[in-house]
Image (spheres, helix red, strand yellow):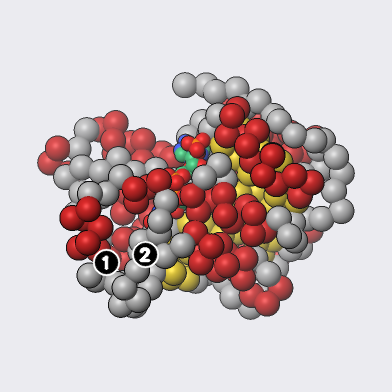
């Protein structure tokens, strides 16, 4: 599939640094985009024109929505060309977009495996590499990769998703060492059980079983994850790199 990214939004030179947030049309990414918009000009991505337009509407003067599929080289390239042309090369990148295609491995179709790994893990390669050059030039950058509590805990029925998220955490530690000398930090956030469309797919039984295992006895909110991302991209977190910050209500303690 070759999706042509259609750009919606203004084309201006901004005073603020630009933050790219993938998967900003809903859920955790939407809240991260709104949270970062106080300090950064936020470019938020969606997979549809309608989603991109809604992001532009939500962010107003503080950002814009664009269409970008992280599982599509052409779409990512087109989006980066637009960011370069409009002086919006990001110095902050939040790799939030992600998908699940749950199944027991014995029943898992190759497409279910490949689509999750290609989106969640290969997408990271596609998004991060083109952003690094401008961060190195600026001698400042912040990368935050959204993992999951299951990267460390494991979860039956999610071998594809867990493998992709564990890969994200390893990538985070490796890249953090590669670019630290350029004043670029690379960290991961591992949310637990957060109220979004992704967890709305779970049955009542699954939700009750999960809640019984959470010491704080509730699901987390998207804002609680966004606060953690906001901290990691701030100057207050300038000496933190290569870590995975858990936001999971105590569900897993390592
Ligand atoms: N919710 C949780 O409990 C939880 C827990 C741990 C980790 N996480 C992680 O947190 C991140 C956000 O989760 P969420 O619950 O907010 O998910 P969500 O509500 O399902 O939203 C997913 C976002 O990713 C975008 N997206 C999906 N496929 C894409 C693709 N191929 N290219 C670009 N964007 C794509 C979607 O865009 P469209 O709207 O255009 O489809 C949407 O903005 C994910 O990485 C997820 O693995 C979530």
In the image shown, does 226 or 165 lie closer to the viewer?
226
Count neighbours of disc 1 (C-alpha within 10 A) and say few if under 14, some if 14 to 19, many if 20 or more: some
Q: CA distance from mark 2 to mark 1?
A: 7 Å
Query: On the image, numbered disc 2 is attached to which residue?
Result: 219
Q: Secondary structure at mark 1?
A: helix
Above or below 132: residue 77: above
Above or below 245: residue 146: above
Residue at disc 2, CB closer than 8 Å to ligand 1: yes
Q: Is residue 58 visible?
A: yes
Residue 123 vs residue 133: left or right?
left
> In the rendering, at what x and y percent does residue 105 appear?
17, 44
Residue 82 quadrant: top right
Q: Which residue is depicted at the point 55% across and 68% down?
A: 228
> In the rendering, at what x and y percent does residue 194 appear?
40, 59
Query: On the image, numbered disc 1 is attached to which residue?
Result: 211
Q: Secondary structure at mark 2?
A: loop
In the image shown, does 20 or 55 lie closer to the viewer?
55
> In the rendering, at what x and y percent does residue 169 appear?
43, 61
2 and 1 marks in contact (CB < 8 Å): yes
In the image shown, does 215 or 239 lie closer to the viewer?
215
Q: Which residue is depicted at the point 55% across and 42% down?
A: 25
């Amino acid at each position: 599939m070759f999706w042509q990214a259609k750009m919606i939004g203004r084309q201006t030179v901004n005073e603020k640094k630009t933050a790219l947030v993938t998967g900003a049309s809903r859920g955790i990414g939407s809240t991260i985009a709104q949270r970062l918009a106080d300090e950064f000009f936020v470019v938020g991505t969606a997979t549809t024109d309608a989603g991109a337009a809604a992001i532009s509407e939500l962010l107003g003067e503080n950002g814009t929505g664009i269409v970008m599929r992280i599982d599509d080289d052409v779409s990512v390239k087109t989006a980066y060309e637009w960011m370069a042309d409009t002086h919006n090369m990001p110095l902050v990148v939040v790799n939030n977009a992600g998908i699940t295609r749950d199944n027991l491995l014995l029943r898992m179709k190759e497409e279910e495996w490949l689509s999750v790994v290609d989106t969640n893990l290969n997408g990271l390669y596609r998004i991060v590499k083109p952003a690094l050059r401008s961060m190195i030039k600026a001698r400042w950058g912040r990368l935050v990769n959204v993992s999951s509590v299951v990267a460390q805990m494991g979860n039956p029925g999610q071998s594809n998703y867990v493998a992709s998220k564990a890969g994200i955490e390893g990538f985070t530690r490796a890249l953090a060492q590669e670019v630290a000398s350029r004043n670029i930090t690379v960290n991961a956030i591992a949310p637990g059980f957060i109220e979004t469309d992704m967890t709305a797919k779970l049955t009542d039984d699954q939700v009750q079983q999960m809640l019984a295992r959470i010491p704080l006895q509730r699901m987390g909110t998207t804002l609680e994850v966004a606060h953690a991302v906001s901290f990691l991209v701030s100057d207050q977190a300038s000496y933190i790199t290569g870590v995975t910050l858990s936001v999971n209500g105590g569900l897993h303690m390592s």
